[in-house]
Structures are given as C-alpha cells and as structure tokens.
C-alpha cells in the first residue's frame, strides 16, 4: 500500500444525514409507485420538494427528514387473536423497517383522504407532524398507546 492511499482512507468520514436522506428518499419514492408508474412518482417527489422550498424558504431535505423522523414509530404492533378479537402485540422494530413503515404510513394516510395524492396535502401532513399535530402524529401516538396497553401480551406471542 502506498502512503497516498492511507491518507485518502483517513480523510473519509461517514455522514449520517446523507445516508438517512438517501434511504428515506428511496423508500418514499418506492412507496409512491402504484401500478409501475416510477416516472410519475419521481416527478411527484421533485415537485413536492420544489413546493416545500417555495413555501418554507428553507432546505426541503432537512424539513422532509426531520418530519419523517418525528413520526417514525418506536414499536410495531403485530396482530394476535384472543377470544375472537384481534389485539396488537408490541414488538421491537429495526431501523430499516422503521423507515419503510413510516413512508408507507404517510402515503396510506394521504390516500385515505383522497384517491389522488396532492402535493399540498403531503406538505401539510409533514409540516403538522413537525409541530406534533395532524393525522400522522396522532397515528403514531395511538400506535404507541395501544402497544403500552397490550404489553402483557408479549409473553403469549410466538416468534
């Protein structure tokens, strides 16, 4: 090994912001795709970032990342049937699964309101989640409360 390679290796640092931004962007665009319309999903995401920059006059990547981290669930509820009623059993969730879950969660909440996704609705959902308001934040709190209420079911759940 020559000395230049060693110097190059020492200068590299790992940037967590860029890693998380890259992962969230890919997962979010992937969950936007419906019936194979990848170009539409990519264009929708670019328009969303442009509108967010016009509205907030701040880095849209930072706002997007902060909002999704704010509504990321801490536990996952797996269904478990007891006496004819389904209960949610709280289970730990990995980091990659959290990212996927929050992206699909936000798209599902938006599609519940309208059949067509609108950029304004997505912006409002994410900005409200930053201020601990809105549907996404309420869904996160509801999921957490149900998990705390059903923590006694963990011992019955078969891994």
Image (cartoon, rainbow, N blue to C red):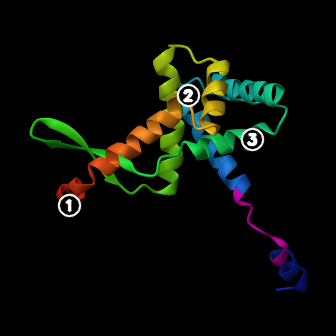
For the residues bearing labels 2 and 1, Cβ distance under 8 angstroms: no
Q: Specify which label sits upstream in the sequence, 2 or 3.
A: 2
Q: Nearer the viewer, residue 143 or 44?
A: 143
Separation of marks 2 and 3 at Cα, in angstroms: 20 Å
Dividing the picture into quarters, in which one does residue 5 lie? bottom right
Please, what secondary structure does the residue beneath circle 1 have? helix
Please, what secondary structure does the residue beneath circle 2 have? loop
Magenta-colored span: 10-16
Q: Specify which label sits upstream in the sequence, 2 or 1.
A: 2
Q: Position of residue 71 (x, y in %)?
A: 54, 42
Q: Residues within 10 Å of mark 3 (few under 14, many from 20)?
A: some
Judge whether residue 15 is colored magenta: yes
- Residue at mark 1: 155
Q: Residues within 10 Å of mark 2 (few under 14, many from 20)?
A: some
Q: Nearer the viewer, residue 119 or 149?
A: 149
- Residue at 69% x, 47% y: name it: 21
Q: Is residue 48 in view?
A: yes
- Residue at mark 3: 61
- Residue at 27% x, 54% y: name it: 151
Q: Indicate whether 110 appears above or below 6.
A: above
Q: Residues within 10 Å of mark 1 (few under 14, many from 20)?
A: few
Q: Which numbered dot is residue 33?
A: 2
Separation of marks 2 and 1 at Cα, in angstroms: 38 Å
Q: Which of label 2 and label 3 is nearer to you?
A: 3
């Amino acid at each position: 090994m020559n000395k230049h390679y060693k110097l190059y290796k020492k200068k590299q640092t790992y940037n967590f912001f860029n890693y998380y931004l890259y992962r969230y962007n890919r997962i979010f665009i992937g969950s936007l795709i419906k019936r194979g319309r990848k170009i539409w999903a990519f264009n929708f995401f670019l328009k969303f970032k442009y509108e967010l920059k016009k509205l907030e006059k701040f880095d849209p990547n930072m706002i997007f990342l902060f909002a999704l981290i704010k509504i990321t669930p801490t536990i996952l509820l797996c269904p478990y049937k007891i006496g004819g009623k389904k209960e949610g059993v709280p289970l730990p969730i990995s980091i990659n699964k959290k990212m996927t879950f929050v992206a699909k969660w936000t798209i599902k909440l938006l599609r519940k309101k309208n059949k067509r996704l609108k950029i304004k609705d997505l912006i409002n959902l994410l900005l409200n989640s930053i201020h601990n308001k809105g549907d996404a934040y309420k869904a996160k709190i509801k999921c957490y409360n149900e998990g705390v209420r059903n923590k006694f079911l963990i011992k019955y759940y078969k891994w």
